[in-house]
Amino acid sequence: MGLLVEGKWVDQWYDTKSSNGKFVREESKFHSWLTADGSAGPTGEAGFKAEKGRYHLYVSLACPWAHRTLIFRALKGLEDYISVTAVNPDMLENGWEFKSFPDNQPNEPLYGFEFHHQVYTKAKPDYTGRVTVPVLWDKKTETIVSNESSEIIRMFNSAFNDLTGNTLDFYPEAQRPEIDRVNERVYHAINNGVYRSGFATSKAAYEEAYVELFDALDWVESVLDSQRYLAGDQLTEADWRLFTTLIRFDAVYYSHFKTNKQRLMDYPNISNYLRELYQVEGVKETVNMEHIKRHYFFSHRTINPTGIVPVGPELDFDAPHDRATRFKKGQAA
Ligand SMILES: N[C@@H](CCC(=O)N[C@@H](CS)C(=O)NCC(=O)O)C(=O)O
């Protein structure tokens, strides 16, 4: 685990000393947008037109943020348009590495890179900052378009529609205020909340994150009691953003990040909803529990010094769910 300082790799764990034991996530640094016609998006540079085969996605199958982009790639039928490389789940002194798992064969197809930080210095030789996944790479101009998952999923939601004919919309205009409102709380208290709990190095910081997390999960449980999805009767990006944290919860966060007030399996609405989302066509293929468990338990040696990966728990996301029978058109039946 480390970061780049003026283009040089430095091996160091997160600094929580300057923030009273709190884990503070660094903002992503690349914010351009891929658009249908190459015009500029809300931030960054213009010139990234949606074209078949032009872009490459670097992900970790373990990472909840990268997982969002893989889900959108699948739901939007972009598999033949955007190629993907998954890093090795072990993230140790060199950060993310390009090696297949578990057989450790080189797997970076564009430049033969060994380390993910080489992607960052290729784009910006004097880059300073964290070296994170996902990264959306432009093969044509050889640069990073974006390393912010919440923005990459919005690009995937619409930029390729004319090319693919897939017009599924997970950020519909009319629901945007509600989606944004839900995202805000889910991001802070749940998506990032599990990390704020697990990476805290003071009891006070851990407990603050823990309380906010379970308050938010209670709120989600009650929302899902009266409507089928987080922002109403339609499946939206708000659901997919929550999904990637939920699917890791009982297997990893509950024990490794000490978020153990109760398991998700113990929430009737959330657990049924989680199974519904998992069973949406194309989604289960994006879930890789081996990478997920291996990454967290093996890589975070400050939290789990032995690196031993637990065998359990046994989880069956293919079990039937009750959401379709409980909600006719998204409303309680
Ligand atoms: N805001 C980023 C966060 C991405 C992120 O933190 N990814 C983690 C893996 S789950 C990572 O690569 N961490 C490496 C590091 O922090 O050094 C996004 O949503 O795209």
Image (spheres, rainbow, N blue to C red):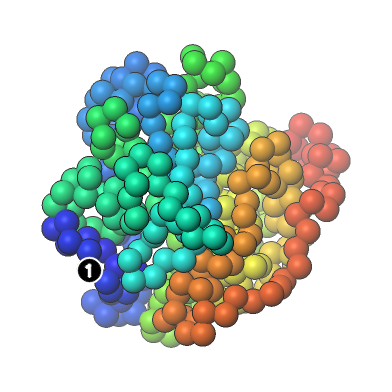
Task: Check mark 1 vs ligand 1: CB closer than 8 Å? yes or no.
Answer: no
Q: Residue 299, position in %: x, y?
A: 46, 72
Q: Residue 183, position in %: x, y?
A: 49, 47
Q: Residue 80, position in %: x, y?
A: 53, 27
- Relative placement, left or right, of 91 versus 13 is right
Name the one closer to the observer, 267 or 247.
247
- Label 1 residue SS: strand
Q: Quadrant of the N terminus?
A: bottom left
Residue receiving disc 1: 10
Q: Quadrant of the C terminus?
A: top right
Residue at 23% x, 77% y: name it: 18
Residue 260 quadrant:
bottom right
Name the one closer to the observer, 206 or 151.
151
- Relative placement, left or right, of 31 versus 191 is left
Residue at 58% x, 28% y: name it: 77
Residue 49 quadrant:
top left
In the rendered image, the vertical position of residue 303 relative to residue 157, given as above or below: below
